[in-house]
Image (spheres, rainbow, N blue to C red):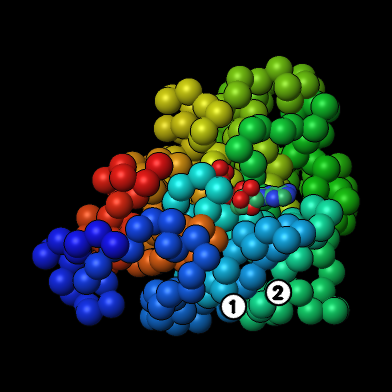
């Protein structure tokens, strides 16, 4: 055990920082994220995720407020992406992955028997680290969702839906004269905005973003960050990031994870500048990488 610095003398249980490895297997009492969120649009309770014998998420409870950006941060392998995938059942697609606990989205238990997973993923869209446009035209990438979900009645409706989604993703001006060109002909940053347009085209209420900027250059990343800020006017966004600076720029609240546990969650300013838990402090100061 390491002596606890005086500045942490906030609560008795935090007076000492155990060796980081002690946290790997031992349960310990940490504040969970169910505290002060009134009418959350996502409510997770006691989530556990196993990949075979690997216990990747440990008893996580976390709420997400409507129209906030919530950043999930923490060291590599702490379970950020795994937790994100719980929110639209993308983990269902991974062989050997078992999820237990409750996840409610807009009041519905998404692991309930009657849930239509295709409809759930329409409501809770996802954008991945590496832009992954379909091998089709720019237009067809965006048109696919509204078409398969039956959201449009005519070609004119579809054209309007495609244009609206590309505008919301901040891409319309750049692609309006090249809608028939392959999505893959765009730059990486544009491809990522195309993937965002594809997700937006089916009118989700929640967007999950798994390190959406990490494959992009600073200009492309900056555009995605600005877009996140704009989209928050209408959507809830949960994003995974390795960049504390990005969490500070884009999110209202931040959750810090460690070895599959939620260590603390709160207003981004508070978590990043006055963390309550020594592990969060250790991560932010580079003692855990
Ligand atoms: N498909 C899988 N099969 C087996 N184990 C997995 C799988 N996906 C993730 N894991 C394990 O689960 C744990 C959490 O992984 P996860 O990718 O969620 O963490 P992360 O915090 O998002 O990591 P990173 O920041 O490196 O992307 C890790 O130990 C990882 O090795």
**Considering depth in this image, is 286 or 3 the residue closer to the camera?**
3
In which quarter of the view is residue 279 placed?
bottom left
Instruction: Pinpoint residue 147: horizontal percent, then vertical percent.
Output: 86, 48
- Give the residue at x 62% y 72%: 47
- Give the residue at x 52% y 27%: 216
In which quarter of the view is residue 127 placed?
top right
Task: Specify the quadrant that holds the C terminus.
Answer: top left
**Considering depth in this image, is 98 or 181 the residue closer to the camera?**
98
- The image shows residue 196, relative to residue 251, as above or below, that is above
Label 2 to label 1: alpha-carbon separation:
8 Å
**Disc 1 beta carbon < 8 A from ligand 1?**
no
- Give the residue at x 37% y 46%: 288
**Considering depth in this image, is 90 or 58 the residue closer to the camera?**
58
Residue most toward the front?
A: 1
- Give the residue at x 31% y 42%: 286
The circle on residue 203 is: none
Residue count near mark 2 (Cα–Cα under 10 Å), binned few <14, some 14–19, many ≥20: some
Task: Specify the quadrant that holds the N terminus.
Answer: bottom left
The circle on residue 100 is: 2
The circle on residue 46 is: 1
- The image shows residue 110, relative to residue 187, as above or below, that is below
Q: Is residue 197 visible?
A: no
Seen in the image, is 185 located left or right of residue 239? right
Residue count near mark 1 (Cα–Cα under 10 Å), binned few <14, some 14–19, many ≥20: some
Seen in the image, is 285 located left or right of residue 205? left
Seen in the image, is 165 located left or right of residue 220? right
Instruction: Pinpoint residue 54: horizontal percent, then vertical percent.
Output: 68, 58
Tell whether label 1 touches label 2 (CB within 8 Å).
yes
């Amino acid at each position: 055990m390491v002596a606890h610095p005086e500045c942490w003398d906030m609560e008795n249980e935090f007076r000492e920082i155990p060796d980081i490895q002690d946290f790997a297997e031992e349960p310990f009492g940490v504040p969970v994220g169910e505290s002060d969120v009134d009418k959350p649009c996502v409510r997770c309770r006691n989530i556990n995720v196993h990949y075979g014998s690997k216990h990747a998420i440990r008893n996580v409870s976390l709420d997400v407020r409507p129209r906030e950006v919530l950043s999930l941060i923490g060291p590599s392998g702490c379970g950020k992406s795994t937790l994100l995938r719980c929110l639209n059942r993308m983990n269902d697609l991974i062989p050997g992955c078992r999820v237990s606990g409750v996840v409610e989205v807009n009041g519905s238990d998404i692991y309930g028997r009657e849930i239509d997973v295709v409809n759930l993923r329409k409501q809770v869209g996802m954008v991945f680290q590496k832009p992954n446009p379909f091998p089709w035209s720019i237009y067809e990438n965006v048109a696919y969702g509204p078409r398969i979900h039956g959201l449009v009645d005519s070609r004119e409706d579809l054209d309007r839906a495609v244009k609206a989604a590309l505008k919301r993703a901040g891409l319309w001006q750049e692609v309006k004269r090249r809608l028939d060109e392959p999505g893959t002909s765009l730059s990486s940053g544009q491809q990522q905005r195309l993937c965002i347009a594809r997700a937006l085209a089916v009118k989700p209420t929640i967007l999950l973003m798994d390190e959406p900027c990490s494959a992009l250059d600073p200009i492309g990343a900056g555009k995605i960050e600005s877009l996140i800020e704009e989209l928050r006017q209408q959507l809830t966004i949960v994003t995974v990031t390795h960049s504390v600076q990005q969490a500070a720029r884009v999110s209202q609240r931040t959750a810090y994870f460690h070895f599959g546990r939620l260590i603390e969650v709160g207003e981004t300013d508070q978590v990043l500048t006055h963390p309550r838990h020594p592990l969060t402090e250790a991560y932010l100061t580079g003692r855990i990488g």
